[in-house]
Amino acid sequence: MKAFYKRNFAVTDQGATDLIKSSIATFFTYFINMLPATLLMLFLDKTLLLNERSNDFYYIICALLLILMYVILSIEYNTLYNATYRESEKLRVDISRNMSNLPLSYFSKHDLTDLAQTIMSDVAALEHALSHAVSKTIGFVAFFTVISIMLLLGNVTLGLCILCPIFAYFLLILLSKQIQTNSFNRYYQKLRKNSDSFQEAIELQMEIQSFGMSKDIKKKLYKEVEEGEKIHIESEFVGVIINSLAGLALYLSQIFVIIVGTTLLINGEISILYFLGYIIAAFKIKEGVEATSFSVVELFYIDSMVKRINDIRSAKRQAGEDKGLSQFDIELKNVSFSYDEDTSVLENVSFVAKQNEVTALVGKSGCGKTSILRLVSRLYDVTGGEILVSNEDIKSISTKSLFDKVSIVFQDVTLFNSSIMDNIRIGKLSATDKEVKNAAKLANCEEFIEKLEYGYDTLIGENGANLSGGERQRLSIARAFLKDAPIIILDEIAASLDVDNEKKIQESLNRLTKNKTVLIISHRLKSIQNVDKIVVIDDGKVEAMGKHEELMKISKVYRDLIDKTVLAENFVY
């Protein structure tokens, strides 16, 4: 039973347990709601059929009924609402924890807005469904099964008069599920697209204003919102039509009971008490079915949300064991890689980046250099061959063990909207202020930090919006200095630095790389001409490797890169 709840409603193990309790409580609540009708039947039995009972009997029944209703409703409220709110908290934490364990490849293949919406909007919608729809629907199904048996045992003819229209109603609802699910999915996809468009418009305000695109963008956004509302209306209209038709079927149960029951009463086949009892039952069951129909539609609505949450949970993780690494040569053996099945990025790449040496990767844009760095740091896994660190295939090493030994500085810098001190401390959360400042000094950050009003306590804005590109880059480099890992991966770290700062960073790197394995990419070939090894990548393959002087003799691709660099430096506007 727990597996059913976890699979169909994306809840945690505790959430499934709570849902079972709330479903049972709701089941008894439906029966409690029938007790006033039962009490009415006893009253009619006394007044119409003259079956005498003492007034004390009714007082006792009423008292017991009130106590029972209080107990059952209290249990239902606690399991239905309090437990649901606790579950929604656990659910968000569970999704976040699962996402933190996913490889980078997962995020490159999925829309980030969609993932953010899963954590916020999807869980909010699921929270409402858990508290208002899931248990009520399942509780009613169990209640309806039991009450159906009781109605048929009492009188088959009248029982069928009530049940057949209701079965027709549920059949109509089930047949419409796919139609409604598709409508809701279309609306969700449109909402996601609109969210992307608004986010893009906000982020690109400078470009929009400078190129006079405000009117066009405004018109486009209005059009997309109107299209979204049109889809929304269509999806709601489908639900209204189906529910209206199904609602008509429900009224037939009351009509059938009155017509058939009157005939049976006239023929003397049933008593007036049975006749009134089945009429009351028809009305009460109709009320329950109508209330449940809204819950069923809500379950249709969350169907796609549950699927997205389960997709995150079932996504493939990077396996591996925690291992103590002691030697940090990086060896690539016939490494192949592709981001998708159709496009090969790397093919049979082999080389060794030795400890206490700097190994540089060079080549044209798009040749696969950055992909190699991502594979070495295990942000992605190879599709062929192997990468060895400390003579261990990194696929057999847990990402935690590997990441502890790797410092990464990529070309695209990501910073948090917090202080400079906190942003650098990400490299080593236990670092003292003195250690942070020393790392900033090594990365040549002191110069601009001291000019800020609050120094290291200055808030830098979303993704470092209050800093220049070069300043953001140097903060990222400071993190790597602070971490002081034995493997250092640098991807175009000088891209946003001026010549003076690049020289200072180069001097810092020379101090940092002692007894470390350094893998670096740079399009400024002068900055890597003195490294220990240069690996030339061409179209996803190793074209040549060696030192600068050697490559000038044996590598056509490297000579071409050097020639173009010289032409670019000598170009005059």
Image (spheres, helix red, strand yellow):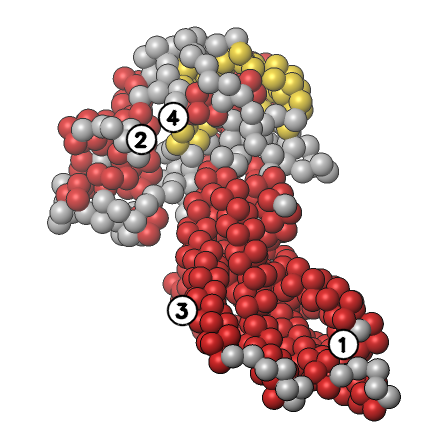
Q: Which mark is residue 407?
A: 4
Q: Which residue type carries mark 3?
A: Gln
**Disc 4 secondary structure class:** strand
Q: Quadrant of residue 1?
A: top right
Q: Quadrant of residue 296?
A: bottom right
Q: Which residue type carries mark 1?
A: Ile
Q: Is residue 442 above or below residue 333?
A: below
Q: Is residue 291 visible?
A: no
Q: Is residue 47 above or below residue 23?
A: below
- Report the front residue among 143 and 503: 143
* N-term mark: 1 or 2: 1
Identify residue for label 3. Answer: 209
* N-term mark: 4 or 2: 4
**Disc 1 secondary structure class:** helix
Q: CA distance from mark 4 to mark 3?
A: 39 Å
Q: CA distance from mark 1 to mark 4?
A: 71 Å
Q: Which residue type carries mark 2?
A: Gly
Q: CA distance from mark 2 to mark 3?
A: 37 Å
Q: Which residue type carries mark 4?
A: Ser
* N-term mark: 4 or 3: 3
Identify residue for label 1. Answer: 162
The answer to whether mark 1 and mark 3 are in CB contact below 8 A is no
**Disc 3 secondary structure class:** helix
Q: Residue shown at 60%/38% (left/top)?
A: 315
The answer to whether mark 4 and mark 2 are in CB contact below 8 A is yes
Please state the horizontal and vertical placement of residue 462, each as a whole percent of the image. 33, 52
- Report the front residue among 365 and 563: 365
